[in-house]
Image: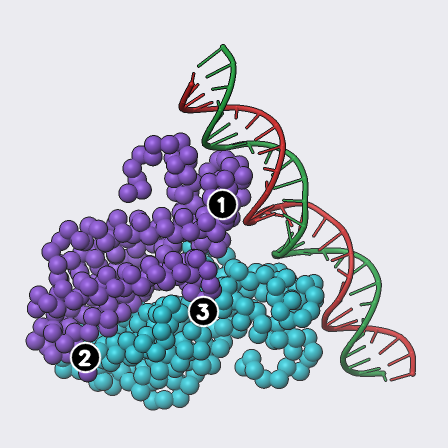
Chain colours: A purple, B cyan, C green, D red
Amino acid sequence: MSTITPTTKRAATRELILEHAYDLARRDGLEGLSIGALAQDVGMSKSGVFAHFGSREDLQLAVLEAGQLRFLQQVKWPALKLPRGLPRLRAIVANWVEWAREYRSGCVLLTAAGEYDGREGPLHDNVTQQQAGWRQEICRAIQHAVENGELGADTDPAQLAFEIYALMLGLHHDAALFCFNEARRHTLAGFERLLVSYGPGTGQGNKP
Amino acid sequence: MSTITPTTKRAATRELILEHAYDLARRDGLEGLSIGALAQDVGMSKSGVFAHFGSREDLQLAVLEAGQLRFLQQVKWPALKLPRGLPRLRAIVANWVEWAREYRSGCVLLTAAGEYDGREGPLHDNVTQQQAGWRQEICRAIQHAVENGELGADTDPAQLAFEIYALMLGLHHDAALFCFNEARRHTLAGFERLLVSYGPGTGQGNKP
DNA sequence: AAAAAGAACGAACGATCGTGCTATTTTCGA
DNA sequence: TCGAAAATAGCACGATCGTTCGTTCTTTTT
């Protein structure tokens, strides 16, 4: 866990720097993050900040991983406490919506996905891996619901996972540009419609 | 129209610069666009490029508007030639998917939406206005389909427009990070499912 | 209290940023 | 063909970028 009290002074300030960096990256993206501005925000010297990360890229990577950890803490892990199947899937969506509320103006993970999807290097690899992993997590939750008989047996998990993920992208988009509450309404309504559409006995999954 | 042959030399080189700038912005975003790199890409001097736009911000605005024009040309205007209602709505989605194919690694409009949603200034205003306008355009197409009886009378256009837009966001996301063809499959399958779900006689729109 | 280790600072580097100003070149009508 | 006008190049500016290095301050250990 990252929020445990660090034992060494070094780890403590590193955590402090990362918190500030995370907030800055929410607005300007990881590419817009500069060491000078970060140092001024934290209240220390440029070189002092720099010394905690061997390079700017390592700083960006650390911020990215910090974001991923927060996402897991707020969205995934609480959902894992619920029983497999629909309850867990619902919890994932509910937690994710709340995540979008808090990070309304800029989710670092989504921003990073847009920034590094066309490039190469460690940041691209990290982003791709994280996104693929999370998508698979959703697929798993869907699969459990199918096995429980809460979703139609002909449900294509990858298809439904795509549609759920799309709804969340729409949520983040509309929440940032327009109104969070309305975006939330649309998202949850769309999700419920998905559950009905993929529900058992309707025979309208997407397996050929 | 932007692709007509410009009469003056000035307009011609401006167009050339914008084409290069557009391609650069697709990879690095409008915030990552620098005049020096652009000049080198075009093959002229920094000041030569700069002279065509009073400032960097004006350059970004011009690139943004060029992107919007291309989007209208490729997605909206061809669809307007089809009859109102479901055919036009289908054409919008089909053209949009092809747009995503071509601009697979970076749609300037979506990237810009992410870059400027949390800031202020002309770029933010332009992005917001464009996004709102396009969403309303989709709503109109849905409304026509409802009036034609091709969608349920209780359909909430804003809700369906949100879900369609969300699918396109998912398409761009997955096409950039994973595989376009699979993303396209998921998008079109999701869209067809939406049409069934909101179809006439099913009585499952979203009006309370 | 003295010594060793660790953390932050301050200055400077070369590079690039956006933006002016002044030449020089290119274009085009008379 | 020549001169006016437009278009581009060249140069310089202050600022900031990421990074390096040597020094100073703080903490810990002996």
Q: Secondary structure at mark 1?
A: loop
Circle 1 Cα neighbour tier, 10 Å, few/some/many (<14 / 14–19 / ≥20): few
The image position of residue A27, as x and y in percent, is 43, 52
Comparing A61 with C4, the one in front is: C4
Look at the picture and state if B152 lies above or below A69: below
Which of marks 1 and 2 precedes in the sequence?
1
Q: Is residue A150 left or right of residue C12?
A: left
Mark seen at residue B189? none
Identify the subunit bearing mark 3.
B
Q: Is residue B173 left or right of residue A55?
A: left
Q: CA distance from mark 3 to mark 1?
A: 30 Å
Q: CA distance from mark 2 to mark 1?
A: 49 Å
Are the residues flagged by discs 3 and 1 in contact, CB closer than 8 Å?
no
- For badge 2, the amino acid type reads Lys
Can you identify the residue that label 1 sits on?
A54
Q: CA distance from mark 2 to mark 3?
A: 31 Å
Can you identify the residue that label 2 sits on?
A207
Circle 3 Cα neighbour tier, 10 Å, few/some/many (<14 / 14–19 / ≥20): many
Q: Is residue A178 visible?
A: no
